[in-house]
Amino acid sequence: MWIAARANTYVDRGRERNVTREFFEDVAVGETREFGDRTVDREEMIEFAEQFDPQPFHVDEAAAEQSMFGGLIASGWHTAAMTMGLLVDNLMVESAATGAIGVDDLRWENPVRPGDTLSVRTEVLDKEPWGGGSLGLVRSGTTTLNQDDDTVMSMVGLVLYERREPADE
């Protein structure tokens, strides 16, 4: 987790980082980015599911083999959490994003299995002023892919960014 320590310096998981912050004005509609490389750990997958989504195909190997998935799969919520980690580590820490007001169109398109390696692709879909002039709302399409370039999850993030110069609205 990162927290603002002072302008352009952040503490990220115990390490201080100096970054150039990307403000609302810097975000370009149509801009795409690809990043990340996170291998899904079987034990972590089961531990997450036992705590937050204890359906048999997430926590029990034998039951999972008898399910429509034919084997153990990650909870979609775990996939979303891993995606968020990749977004924070590779994109958000370099931005003036202040948080999100939600997501639209969340879909789990293919199962995530132990040993899969996930990456993320984003595309800025649109942006607009928000909240009285000091913030802007950016709609960003996010696609999570596995090592075979299959889409495993997609969503549209509704992310608030600081404006470099607050607008008079």
Image (spheres, rainbow, N blue to C red):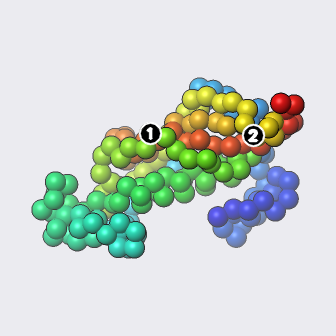
Q: Is 80 on the left-hand or right-hand side of 72?
A: right
The answer to whether marks 1 and 2 mark residues whose Cβ atoms lie closer than 8 Å is: no
For marks 1 and 2, the one nearer the N-term is 1
In the rendered image, residue 54, in percent from the top left (x then y), is placed at: 31, 69
* Residue in view at x 47 percent, y 57 percent: 82
Quarter of the image with the N terminus is bottom right
**What is the total number of numbered labels drawn onto the structure image?**
2
| Above-or-below relation of 99 to 50 | above
* Residue in view at x 30 percent, y 46 percent: 110
Q: Which residue is mark 2?
A: 131
Quarter of the image with the C terminus is top right
The amino acid marked with disc number 2 is: Gly
Which of the 4 quarters of the picture holds residue 58? bottom left
Q: Is residue 101 visible?
A: yes
| Above-or-below relation of 86 to 141 | below
Query: For the residue labelled by badge 2, is the local secondary structure a helix, a strand or a loop?
Result: loop
In the rendered image, residue 22, in percent from the top left (x then y), is placed at: 74, 41
Q: Is residue 142 visible?
A: no
Which of the 4 quarters of the picture holds residue 130? top right
Mark 2 crowd level (few <14, some 14–19, many ≥20, 10 Å Cα): few
Mark 1 crowd level (few <14, some 14–19, many ≥20, 10 Å Cα): few
Q: Is 147 on the left-hand or right-hand side of 59?
A: right
Query: Which disc, if any, is residue 105?
Result: 1
In this view of the protein, which residue sits in the foreground, 46 or 41? 46
The amino acid marked with disc number 1 is: Asp
Q: Is 122 on the left-hand or right-hand side of 19?
A: left
